[in-house]
Image (spheres, coloured by chain):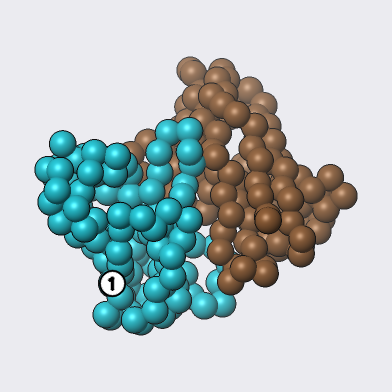
Chain colours: A brown, B cyan
C-alpha cells in the first residue's frame, strides 16, 4: 500500500541555518502531498501542500516541491528561527482509499538561539 | 476559520472506567477522524466517519468505539480504559471535497 518515509529526527540547528527535512513516498496513483506542523502541546496545522507533479507549495518561508521522478517532497527553509521548533509531518492523500491521509512518523526540529 | 474543538486538553482516568472524548467542528464538515499519537509511532487512525451515523474502523480500533449522531460531533469512547491507552488523542475534520484535514488541539489522556 501507499506509504510515506521521513528522515528521522531529532534535527537540531542554530538560528538562521538552512533546513531540509527529507520525505519520500510510495503510491500507486497520483497523490496529493502535504506538510503539517505540530508546535509543542498543540494539534497539527497544515503548513503547505502540492496536488500535482512539479507543484511547489510554500508558506511562512517553507517550501516543498512535488518531484514525481524521485517520489519526493522535501521540506526546506532558508533561515530557521527559534519559533520553528516543532514536529513536522509529511503526508499523502491516498486517491484510491477514500483519500485518507497516509502519514510519515514525524521529524522533530529544535532550533537554538 | 474552521474550528475543531476537543472538549478537554488533559484528562486523567482510572483503569476500567468508560471514557468519552468529544470533538466538535463548526463548519459543516462531512468527514471526521480520530487519531492517537505516541512517541516513535506517529499518528495512527482509530476510527473515521464520512457522514452522520457512518463509521469505519481505522488501523487500531480495538478497545475503542465511536458515535456520530450529529454532523458536528464525533465522540470517541474507551469502553474500559487501560493503561496502554494513555496517549495524545487528536480529532480532525474536512469537507467531502477537501484533501487536507483541520485538527483540534488534542486531548492528552492518562489512564492510571
The picture places residue A103, in percent across and down from the top left corner, at 57, 49
* Residue A36 visible somewhere in the drawing: yes
Q: Can you say which quadrant of the picture contains the N terminus of chain B? A: bottom left
Q: As drawn, is A78 to the left or to the right of B48? A: right
Above or below, A88 relative to B102 = above
The residue at 76%/64% (across/down) is A29
Q: Which of A41 and B84 is in front in this view?
A: B84
Q: Nearer the viewer, residue A28 or A53?
A: A28
Q: As drawn, is B108 to the left or to the right of B99? A: left
Q: Which of B35 and A73 is in front in this view?
A: B35
Q: Can you say which quadrant of the picture contains the C terminus of chain B? A: top left
Report the chain holding disc 1. Answer: B
The residue at 57%/20% (across/down) is A13
The residue at 56%/26% (across/down) is A9
Q: Which of B60 and A54 is in front in this view?
A: B60
Q: As drawn, is B49 to the left or to the right of B68? A: right
Above or below, B17 relative to B96 = above
Residue holding disc 1: B67
Amino acid at each position: 500500500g501507499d506509504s510515506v518515509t521521513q528522515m528521522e529526527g531529532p534535527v537540531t540547528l542554530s538560528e538562521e541555518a538552512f533546513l531540509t527535512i527529507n520525505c519520500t513516498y510510495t503510491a500507486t496513483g497520483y497523490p496529493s502531498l502535504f506538510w503539517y506542523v505540530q508546535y509543542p502541546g498543540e494539534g497539527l496545522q497544515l503548513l503547505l501542500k502540492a496536488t500535482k507533479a512539479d507543484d511547489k507549495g510554500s508558506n511562512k518561508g517553507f517550501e516543498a516541491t512535488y518531484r514525481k521522478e524521485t517520489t519526493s517532497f522535501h521540506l526546506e527553509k532558508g533561515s530557521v528561527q527559534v519559533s520553528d521548533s516543532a514536529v513536522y509531518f509529511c503526508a499523502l492523500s491516498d486517491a484510491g482509499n477514500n483519500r485518507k491521509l497516509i502519514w510519515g512518523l514525524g521529524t522533530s526540529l529544535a532550533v537554538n538561539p | 476559520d474552521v474550528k475543531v474543538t476537543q472538549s478537554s486538553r488533559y484528562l486523567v482516568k482510572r483503569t476500567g472506567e468508560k471514557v468519552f472524548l468529544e470533538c466538535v467542528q463548526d463548519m459543516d464538515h462531512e468527514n471526521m477522524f480520530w487519531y492517537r499519537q505516541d512517541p516513535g509511532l506517529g499518528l495512527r487512525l482509530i476510527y473515521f466517519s464520512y457522514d452522520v451515523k457512518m463509521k469505519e474502523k481505522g488501523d487500531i480500533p480495538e478497545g475503542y468505539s465511536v458515535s456520530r449522531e450529529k454532523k458536528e460531533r464525533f465522540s470517541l469512547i474507551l469502553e474500559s480504559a487501560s493503561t496502554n491507552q494513555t496517549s495524545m488523542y487528536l480529532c480532525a475534520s474536512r469537507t467531502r471535497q477537501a484533501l487536507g484535514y483541520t485538527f483540534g488541539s488534542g486531548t492528552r489522556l492518562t489512564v492510571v
